[in-house]
Image (spheres, rainbow, N blue to C red):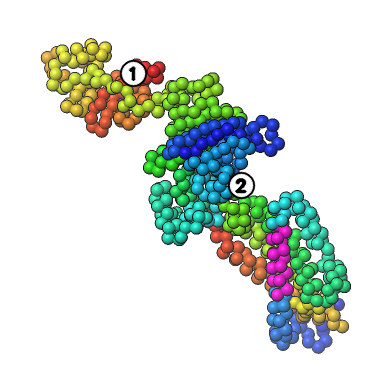
C-alpha cells in the first residue's frame, strides 16, 4: 500500500507548485491510474514515489515505511519502474537488461539466470531473444523487456509512466491486455500514469483524475467515475461517449437476462404467437433443448405446422457471457431482431434489449 | 630537387635498400621507442583527461575553462613547446612526454564529455530509477555507452601523437624522427633515412588506428547489430 499525505512539489524557479497538497491511498494489489491533462502533475507525483523527484513537503509511505527514511537507491531497487521511452541499456543484451536489479542486489548467478528464464517466458518473449541487443527488437518487444526488467527482483510495487505511449494503437491494445492478464496473476501494487482516459478506464482498478497543479478531482473505480463525474472538469475530461465507455466496463451477466420470445421447437404456432404477443415482437426464437436454433417471422408461421418445422433464420451476432454491455449494444444495433443473444459456450443464456441497457445506464 | 640529382655519384638509387637492410636493428629499436613514447603519451593523456572530464561533468561551469586551456595547449607549435620546456626539464624523456601529453588533452576531454553527454536521458533515468548509485552508473552505464566516441578521440589523439613523436627527435628523444633528422643533417641530404622515418611513422599511425578501430568493434558489439 502506498500512502501519500499532503504531498507538494514546487520546482525551483516556478511560481506555482506542480503538485499541491495531494493525499492519496493506493491499496495493496490494485492498479491505480493517475490521469489528467498535461501539467496536472501526474508524472511528478509518480516520480516522487521513487524519489526521482524529491517532494517539497508531505510524506509518502510505501508498505508502512517512510520513503524518505530509506536511501534512495535502496528504495528504488524495491520498486519496479517503467518509463515511456523504456530506457533499455543499449550496450547490454536483453538478458543483461532484465538482470539489472538482481545484479544490483547482488543475487548469485544461478538465481539471476533462473529469474531471466522465468521472465522471458512470462512476457512471451522468444528465448533466442535473450542474447540480442535492444536495437534488434521491435517497439512492442522492447516494451515487454522493459516490463520484465521492472519485475525482475519481484518488487511489490510497480510504477509505470505512460509505458505504452510510444507504440502504435494495435500494439498498445495488446500490451494493455497483457498487463491486465499479468496483473491478475501477480497482484502488484501498480501506479500507472497516462493522459489517455480510455487507457485509464480500461486498466485501472481505480482512477485518480488530476487537474492542473496536482489537484485531485475524483478518485474512484472507473465505472463510478463514468457513472457520476464529481464535477464539470471530470465530466469534460471524460469526454464524449461517457455512456459507451461505461458500458464497456459492465459485464453482460451483471444484468438480468430475459428469456425472450423463445419457444421450444415442438410447440404449436398458437403458443409461439402468444410468446410474441407477450414480448411485443414480430418474430419468435426457436429452441432445441438448450440450443437456440434461430428465429422465424411471425407472419411466416403456417398454423397447421409445428414451430420447429419452419425454416429458421440465424441470429447473426451472438455474444459471450463474458462480453461487456458495449459489445451487447453493438450486437443489438447490428441485427434485425434488436436483441443481443447471450451464450455461455453452447448454452443459451438469454437476451438483452436496448431498453435494459439504457435502464442500466440511468441507474 | 637538387639533392635528388646529387645522388648521381656513389650509390645511384634514390632509396638505398642495402642501407635499410643493414640498419634493420636500429629501425626496429626506434620503432619500439616511437611506440613507447606514443603509448605513454596517450595513456597518461587519457588518465588526465578522464579526470578533467569527470570534473567538467560534475561542475559544468568548469568545462569551458578546461576546454579553453586544452585548446591553448593544442595551439602551441610543438617546437615552441619543447623550447619552453627544455630550460626546466632538459633534453629529457619527461620534456618529450609533457609536450606530447598536453597535445592529447583537448581531443580526449572533448570526446569524453561529448560521449557522456550523448548517453540518452531515458537510459539515465531508467538506471537511476532502478537503484543505480551515481558512481556505479558512471562506470556501468555512461562510460560504456560513451566508449565509441571516446575511442574515436583516442584514435585521433594517437595518430596525432605518432606524428608529433617524430619531432621529439629534436630534443634527442629517438623514435623514427631520428632518421628524418639524420637524413637532413648530413652534408648531402640522405633521402633513404628520411624515407624510413616518414614511411615508418605513417605506417605506425595507420596500424595503430586500425587496431583501435578493431578494439572499438570488440568493446562495443551492440553498435553493429540493428533490427532488420
Residue B54, percent from left and from top? 69, 57
Asked if marks 1 and 2 touch (Cβ < 8 Å), the reply is: no
Residue A329, percent from left and from top? 36, 23
Chain of the residue that carries numbered disc 2 in the rendered image: B
Q: Secondary structure at mark 1?
A: helix
Magenta segment, which residues? B36-53
* Camera-nearest residue between B89 and A154: A154
| Residue lying farthest to the left in this orientation | A304
Quadrant showing the C terminus of chain A:
top left
Classify 10 Å Cα crowding around label 2: few (below 14), some (14-19), many (20 and above).
few
Whether residue B189 sits left or right of residue A119 in the image: it is: right
Residue A257, percent from left and from top? 28, 22
* Camera-nearest residue between A351 and A118: A118
Q: Is residue B191 above or below residue A179?
A: below
* Camera-nearest residue between A119 and B16: A119
Classify 10 Å Cα crowding around label 1: few (below 14), some (14-19), many (20 and above).
some
At 65% across and 61% down in the image, what residue appears? B151
At 47% across and 39% down in the image, what residue appears? A1
Using the rendered view, name the quadrant where residue B195 is placed: bottom right
The circle on residue A356 is: 1
At 77% across and 56% down in the image, what residue appears? B66
Whether residue B199 sits left or right of residue A304 in the image: it is: right
Whether residue B51 sits left or right of residue A92 in the image: it is: right
Query: Of helix, strand and loop, which mostly describes the magenta segment?
Result: helix
Amino acid at each position: 500500500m502506498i500512502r501519500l499525505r499532503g504531498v507538494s512539489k514546487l520546482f525551483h524557479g516556478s511560481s506555482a507548485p506542480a503538485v499541491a497538497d495531494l493525499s492519496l491511498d493506493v491499496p495493496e494489489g490494485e492498479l491505480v491510474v493517475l490521469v489528467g491533462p498535461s501539467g496536472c502533475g501526474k508524472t511528478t507525483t509518480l516520480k516522487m514515489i521513487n524519489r526521482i523527484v524529491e517532494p517539497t513537503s508531505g510524506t509518502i509511505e510505501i508498505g508502512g515505511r517512510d520513503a524518505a527514511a530509506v536511501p534512495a537507491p535502496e528504495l528504488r531497487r524495491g520498486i519496479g519502474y517503467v518509463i515511456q521511452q523504456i530506457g533499455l541499456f543499449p550496450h547490454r543484451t536483453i538478458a543483461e537488461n532484465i538482470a539489472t536489479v538482481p545484479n544490483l542486489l547482488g543475487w548469485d548467478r544461478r538465481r539471476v539466470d533462473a529469474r531471466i528464464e522465468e521472465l522471458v517466458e512470462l512476457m512471451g518473449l522468444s528465448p533466442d531473444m535473450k542474447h540480442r541487443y535492444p536495437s534488434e527488437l521491435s517497439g512492442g518487444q522492447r516494451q515487454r523487456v522493459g516490463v520484465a526488467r521492472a519485475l525482475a527482483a519481484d518488487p511489490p510495487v510497480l510504477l509505470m509512466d505512460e509505458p505504452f505511449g510510444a507504440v502504435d494503437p494495435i500494439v498498445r491494445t495488446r500490451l494493455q491486455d497483457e498487463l491486465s492478464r499479468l496483473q491478475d496473476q501477480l497482484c502488484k501494487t501498480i501506479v500507472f500514469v497516462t493522459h489517455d482516459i480510455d487507457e485509464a478506464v480500461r486498466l485501472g482498478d481505480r482512477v485518480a483524475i488530476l487537474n492542473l497543479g496536482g489537484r485531485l478531482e475524483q478518485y474512484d473505480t472507473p465505472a463510478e467515475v463514468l457513472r457520476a463525474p464529481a464535477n464539470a472538469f471530470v465530466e469534460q475530461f471524460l469526454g464524449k461517449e461517457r455512456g459507451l465507455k461505461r458500458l464497456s466496463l459492465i459485464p453482460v451477466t451483471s444484468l438480468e437476462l430475459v428469456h425472450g420470445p423463445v419457444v421450444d421447437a415442438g410447440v404449436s404456432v398458437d403458443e409461439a404467437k402468444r410468446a410474441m404477443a407477450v414480448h411485443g415482437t414480430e418474430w419468435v426464437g426457436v429452441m432445441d433443448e438448450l440450443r437456440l436454433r434461430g428465429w422465424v417471422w411471425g407472419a411466416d408461421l403456417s398454423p397447421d405446422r409445428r414451430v420447429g418445422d419452419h425454416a429458421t433464420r440465424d441470429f447473426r451476432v451472438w455474444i459471450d457471457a463474458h462480453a461487456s454491455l458495449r459489445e451487447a449494444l453493438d450486437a443489438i444495433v447490428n441485427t434485425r431482431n434488436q436483441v443481443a443473444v447471450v451464450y455461455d459456450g453452447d448454452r443459451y443464456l438469454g437476451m438483452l434489449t436496448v431498453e435494459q441497457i439504457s435502464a442500466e445506464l440511468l441507474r | 630537387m637538387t639533392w635528388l640529382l646529387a645522388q648521381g655519384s656513389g650509390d645511384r638509387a634514390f632509396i638505398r635498400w642495402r642501407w635499410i637492410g643493414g640498419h634493420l636493428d636500429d629501425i626496429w629499436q626506434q620503432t619500439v621507442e616511437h611506440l613507447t613514447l606514443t603509448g605513454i603519451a596517450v595513456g597518461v593523456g587519457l588518465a588526465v583527461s578522464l579526470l578533467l572530464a569527470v570534473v567538467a561533468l560534475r561542475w559544468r561551469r568548469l568545462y569551458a575553462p578546461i576546454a579553453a586551456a586544452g585548446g591553448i595547449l593544442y595551439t602551441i607549435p610543438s617546437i615552441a613547446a619543447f623550447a619552453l620546456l627544455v630550460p626546466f626539464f632538459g633534453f629529457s624523456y619527461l620534456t618529450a612526454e609533457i609536450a606530447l601529453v598536453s597535445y592529447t588533452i583537448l581531443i580526449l576531454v572533448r570526446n569524453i564529455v561529448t560521449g557522456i553527454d550523448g548517453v540518452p536521458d531515458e537510459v539515465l533515468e531508467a538506471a537511476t530509477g532502478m537503484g543505480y548509485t551515481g558512481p556505479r552508473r558512471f562506470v556501468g552505464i555512461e562510460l560504456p555507452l560513451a566508449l565509441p566516441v571516446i575511442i574515436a578521440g583516442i584514435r585521433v589523439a594517437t595518430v596525432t601523437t605518432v606524428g608529433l613523436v617524430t619531432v621529439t627527435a629534436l630534443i634527442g628523444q629517438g623514435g623514427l624522427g631520428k632518421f628524418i633528422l639524420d637524413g637532413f643533417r648530413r652534408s648531402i641530404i640522405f633521402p633513404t633515412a628520411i624515407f624510413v622515418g616518414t614511411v615508418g611513422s605513417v605506417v605506425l599511425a595507420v596500424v595503430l588506428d586500425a587496431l583501435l578501430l578493431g578494439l572499438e568493434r570488440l568493446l562495443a558489439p551492440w553498435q553493429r547489430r540493428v533490427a532488420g
